[in-house]
Image (cartoon, grey):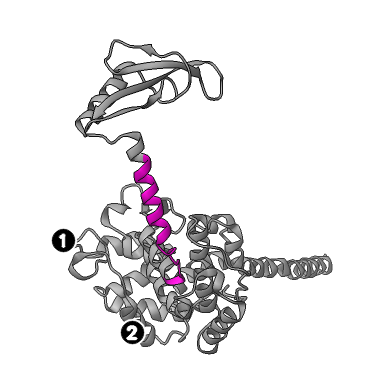
Amino acid sequence: MPSMKRIKTKYPGVFFIWGSEVGTGKPERIFYIVYRRNGVLTEEKAGRERQNDMSAARAAKIRVRRIQGDEISNQERREAARIEGERLKAIPPQRWTVSKLFDEWQESHPFLKGLAQDRSHFRHIEGLSDKEPQEITPVEVDSIRNDIMQTLSPQTAKLALSLLRRIVRWGVKRNLCQSLPFAIELPKVNNVVTEFLTPEQITKLLEFIDSEPTNPGGAMMKLALYSGLRRGELFRLTWPDIDFQNGFIHIRAPKSGRDEIVPLNEEARSLLTKWPKDDSVYVFPGQGGKQRAEVRRAVNRIKAKTGLPADFRPLHGLRHTFASLLASSGQADLYSIQHLLRHRNPQTTMRYAHLRDEILRRTSNLTGVLIKEFISKERRQGRMK
């Protein structure tokens, strides 16, 4: 107890002394309580006036609760904290292995769109499951990279190693684990593929789709070609998303993360107007009227029937074809194409620049032809005179 004058209050067993406020040094009341429980006399601090928002009335309530046994004393609280501290020290520290980090990461990201793909990619790094990040060696990561690339693409290796790096960084930010003792070198991937169907291929594809007017796979392929919608956007498309009156399609939860709109052109309007509705809110529902999760079998059948290239990705490739047709027409600038495709980065749209440049080159070549025709015309007119 400080050797300072005790000042009684109107509440029995409550007094205060004058002390200095922490940080400012200003005078501050420090309240104490005195009580007896189980025959033991106890005197202890209740709290400071400003730091703990303490008053004589509050101190009196604390005193009553401790007399009645509803609240333990400061000494008992300190003893309980000491015992708990000793107990925690006796428990071996938790090992945040790669597997445990990934499980915890999944729990923290239940609505992540790419969670299923991440689970698939995790199987490539399962050999590190029982290791903590700081225990992993560069040799082990190199081995994983080489094993993947022997049978799968560099892109798969990149995604698997990126997942490892991502979950470790997530654990480090939350003080769950240490960081990797080295930087992971990701495989270089050239994934800029611009798929483009020829006019003959597009004609054959549309003729086949029109021959099966109720086939959802064909309808989705046709809408991808006319609107440039992504695969997931087609799956999530609902009837309320389509504004026939104003001519827009609302894209919910797109890749950019914020809702967007795309124009509803006449071909897309015609397709959707004729498309049959059922009890589901989704335009292309899956089983039980729920959101569709897959359409691979249907579109691959159409791809085979129409003789499209084996490596052509039906929905994604038709989105590329949509953009390529606009770029090669010479009537759409790259800025407009970027907004129709909803690319956040203009560089992504630049993959179509060569198609636009080819149009400009052909147009420029007309100059020589026109000059020759102009000179020839002038000469003919001169001879006629």
| Residue 254 makes an appearance in the image | no
Quick one: label 1, few (<14), some, or many (20+) residues within 10 Å?
A: few
- Give the SS element for disc 2: helix
Q: Which mark is residue 301?
A: 2
Query: Nearer the N terminus, badge 1 or badge 2?
Result: 1
Whether residue 129 sits left or right of residue 270 in the image: it is right
Which segment did they paint magenta? 78-99
- The residue under the point 38% across, 26% down is 45
Q: Nearer the viewer, residue 188 or 264?
A: 188
Location of residue 106 (image quadrant):
bottom left
- Give the SS element for disc 1: loop
Residue position for label 1: 279
- The residue under the point 52% across, 59% down is 172
Q: Position of residue 279 (x, y in %)?
A: 16, 61
Q: Nearer the viewer, residue 83 or 26?
A: 83
Amino acid at dot 1: Asp
The quadrant the C terminus occupies is bottom right
Whether residue 135 sits left or right of residue 8 in the image: it is right
Whether residue 367 sits left or right of residue 198 in the image: it is right
Q: Position of residue 342 (x, y in %)?
A: 49, 57
Q: Position of residue 205 (x, y in %)?
A: 39, 79
Whether 41 is drawn above or below 292: the answer is above
Residue that extends furthest to the bottom in the rendered view of this protein: 150
- The residue under the point 23% across, 25% down is 64
Q: Which mark is residue 293?
A: none
| Residue 310 makes an appearance in the image | yes
Location of residue 158 (image quadrant):
bottom right
Residue 2 painted magenta = no
The quadrant the N terminus occupies is top left
Amino acid at dot 2: Arg
Q: Nearer the viewer, residue 360 or 315?
A: 315
Quick one: label 2, few (<14), some, or many (20+) residues within 10 Å?
A: few
